[in-house]
Image (spheres, rainbow, N blue to C red):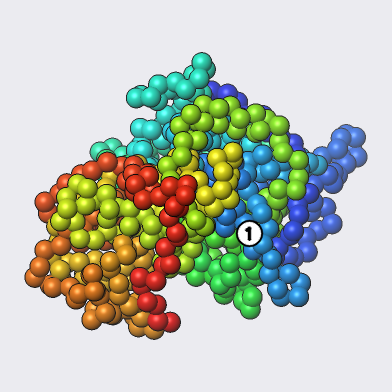
């Protein structure tokens, strides 16, 4: 790979905005240390011999970043559209946040007055998107990101929801191979490079997209390496990752850091679609208290501790959490690690102080903080226009009523009312395919949002529209029926909290006829109390055969549920959203709406 920045894949050369920084609601997560007096931008020394002004040795570079947008162009609803903020007195409050009309305004305001500014992202820009984007294979989101002047992003696992060929189309442009062009203009693709350093073609062993990219301005060079989580095949459908190999994140980043160094690039940022779990859900929680990184756990901690010191900062994602921490690199030197929650509710503003003498970042001066994308600023007119264009195209499909609810159906908690509703719908739908269907199980990661009682548009309170249903279940998984022994069914429940799910449990959402106790005071598989498992009030018979409804992702063994990949007597039905739609239409009306499930099927002991 050449050492210089590559032209953007669409063939259009990026014009870097010479703007950045009036941030609001600053949080900690910074490393502060004194530098020489000329350590900041706009300071120039004078060559007295020749009468020329020369750049100062130290140049501040602004890095704006966000992650896990998931095509949320419009402000997310319910809890998905709020962030929690710790107040000076220790209490917390919530703030409405998100929406690209506001994100654009915040980023543009943040860039003002900054001559050196880069905007980067940590993956999952698309996939699991609301109808306005998902219905059009996320072309609207790519258009929005182009208008946001995004410079570079890593791939995330959801970039592979529709496979590598579709990801390549989003990068390079062209109309969809099946659905064609949605407007009279050909889709141009992304202005920015997607980086996929650890995603290889299985046959060639080469990265499917660029592994790195270099930003350059007036002698300042900063390299970006992009990776997604190695376990992407475990959280994406088998068809989406067919023919691909996902390599270790640390080994890959360390490899390309050496490549960049050999090309004279010593300042490096890693964009990693893998993350951590802070001890608080508040975006401005100090995860460095009482010590560096002490308030954060999860995969990113070990990753950060092992990435070469050649890398100066980590922009992360995937967990939808918010943090701006420091975690020591292998040499013991503190290094900033950030994540800006999800859905465009936050952005991170990081100051990288570039040393022109060494070509490296003066890491003791790196400062980083998350800022809320409030909805109290003016909307960006170009984003309003973009949303209006795509909403007009989506309206005939999205505004159709598919059911009625009597109250909010939230997607919160270990067992969520929304997850329960989907499981009930899949059991009901399964029985229409095969009356012998016994139970349904839904993966929590497939439930992308809840349903709100209050009308979002003109449909009226309590009306569930197709667009709202699409936001809840955007993956187009099919509903699959399979046979399992009772012993296998019990094993499936134990796999929620053991094996690859031991440290980060994935609790399946059960249909109403399945109940059991989850004892979180125990460890591993023992957390599922076997003697408590009841189906229709009766204990599971290990030798009996049970007909189980799941989605196609789980039926393929996804999310670490290997036993679900061993079912027999398969029967494949329609997509999961159709199942939910038919269930709501059959079981609810304007005068008799469906009540939100109570979410008491799993008894949790803590």
Image position, residue 73 (x, y; %) = 58, 40
Q: On the picture, is 562 further left or further right than 132? A: left
Q: Residue furthest top?
A: 184
Instruction: Say few, some or many: other residues with alpha carbon within 10 Å of mark 1 (under 14 / 14 to 19 / 20 or more).
Output: many
Q: Position of residue 439 (x, y in %)?
A: 24, 61
The residue lying toward the viewer, choosing from 58 and 75, is 75
Quarter of the picture holding the C terminus: bottom left
Residue at coordinates 13% horizontally, 73% vertically from top-left?
A: 541
State the residue lying farthest toward the left.
543
Image: 60 above or below 412: above
Label 1 secondary element: strand
Residue carrying label 1: 83
Q: Residue 76, position in %: x, y?
A: 58, 48
Relative horizontal placement of residue 213, taking residue 587 as reference (left or right): right
Measured from the top left, where is residue 510 in percent x and y?
Answer: 32, 63
Residue 326 versus residue 100 in the image, above or below: below
Q: Looking at the rendering, which quadrant does residue 26 occupy?
A: bottom right
Q: Name the residue located 84 percent from the left edge and 46 percent from the top edge.
A: 43
Whether residue 382 is visible, yes or no, is yes
- Left or right: 576 as drawn, with respect to 396: left
């Amino acid at each position: 790979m050449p050492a210089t920045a590559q032209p953007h894949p669409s063939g259009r050369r990026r014009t870097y905005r010479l703007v950045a920084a009036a941030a609001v609601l600053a949080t900690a997560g910074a490393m502060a240390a004194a530098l020489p007096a000329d350590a900041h931008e706009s300071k120039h020394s004078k060559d007295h011999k020749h009468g020329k002004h020369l750049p100062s040795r130290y140049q501040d570079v602004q890095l704006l970043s966000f992650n896990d947008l998931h095509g949320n162009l419009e402000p997310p609803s319910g809890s998905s559209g709020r962030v929690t903020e710790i107040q000076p007195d220790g209490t917390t409050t919530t703030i409405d946040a998100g929406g690209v009309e506001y994100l654009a305004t915040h980023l543009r305001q943040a860039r003002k007055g900054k001559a050196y500014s880069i905007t980067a992202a940590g993956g999952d820009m698309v996939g699991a998107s609301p109808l306005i984007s998902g219905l059009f294979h996320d072309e609207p989101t790519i258009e929005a990101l182009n208008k946001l002047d995004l410079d570079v992003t890593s791939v995330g696992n959801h970039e592979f929801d529709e496979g590598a060929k579709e990801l390549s189309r989003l990068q390079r442009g062209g109309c969809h191979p099946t659905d064609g062009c949605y407007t009279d203009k050909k889709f141009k693709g992304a202005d920015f490079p997607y980086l996929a350093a650890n995603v290889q073609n299985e046959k060639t062993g080469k990265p499917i997209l660029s592994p790195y990219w270099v930003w350059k301005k007036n002698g300042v060079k900063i390299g970006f390496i992009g990776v997604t989580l190695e376990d992407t095949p475990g959280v994406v459908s088998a068809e989406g990752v067919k023919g691909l190999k996902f390599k270790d994140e640390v080994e890959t980043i360390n490899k390309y850091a050496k490549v960049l160094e050999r090309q004279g690039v010593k300042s490096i940022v890693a964009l990693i679609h893998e993350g951590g779990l802070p001890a608080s859900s508040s975006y401005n929680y100090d995860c460095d208290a009482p010590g560096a990184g002490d308030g954060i756990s999860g995969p990113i901690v070990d990753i950060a501790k092992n990435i070469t010191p050649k890398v100066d900062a980590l922009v992360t994602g995937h967990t939808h959490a918010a943090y701006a921490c420091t975690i020591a690199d292998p040499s013991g030197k503190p290094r900033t690690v950030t994540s800006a929650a999800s859905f465009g509710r936050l952005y991170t503003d990081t100051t990288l102080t570039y040393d022109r003498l060494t070509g490296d970042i003066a890491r003791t001066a790196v400062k980083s903080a998350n800022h809320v994308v409030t909805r109290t600023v003016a909307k960006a007119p170009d984003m309003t226009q973009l949303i209006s264009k795509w909403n007009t195209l989506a309206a005939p499909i999205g505004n159709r009523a598919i059911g009625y609810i009597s109250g909010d159906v939230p997607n919160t908690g270990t067992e969520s009312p929304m997850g329960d509703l989907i499981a009930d719908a899949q059991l009901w739908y399964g029985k229409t395919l095969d009356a012998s269907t016994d139970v349904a199980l839904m993966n929590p990661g497939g439930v992308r949002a809840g349903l709100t009682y209050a009308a979002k548009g003109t449909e009226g309170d309590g009306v569930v529209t197709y667009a709202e249903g699409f936001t809840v279940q955007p993956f187009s998984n099919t509903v699959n029926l399979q046979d399992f022994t009772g012993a296998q069914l019990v094993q499936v429940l134990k796999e929620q909290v053991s094996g690859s799910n031991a440290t980060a449990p994935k609790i399946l959402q059960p249909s109403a006829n399945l109940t059991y106790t989850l004892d979180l005071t125990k460890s591993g598989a023992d957390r599922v109390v076997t003697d408590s498992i009841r189906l229709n009030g009766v204990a599971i018979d290990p030798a009996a055969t049970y007909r189980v409804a799941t989605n196609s992702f789980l039926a393929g063994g996804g999310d670490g549920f290997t036993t679900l990949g061993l079912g027999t007597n398969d029967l494949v039905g329609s997509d999961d959203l159709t199942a939910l739609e038919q269930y709501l239409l059959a079981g609810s009306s304007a005068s008799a709406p469906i009540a939100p499930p109570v979410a008491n099927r799993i008894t949790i002991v803590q």
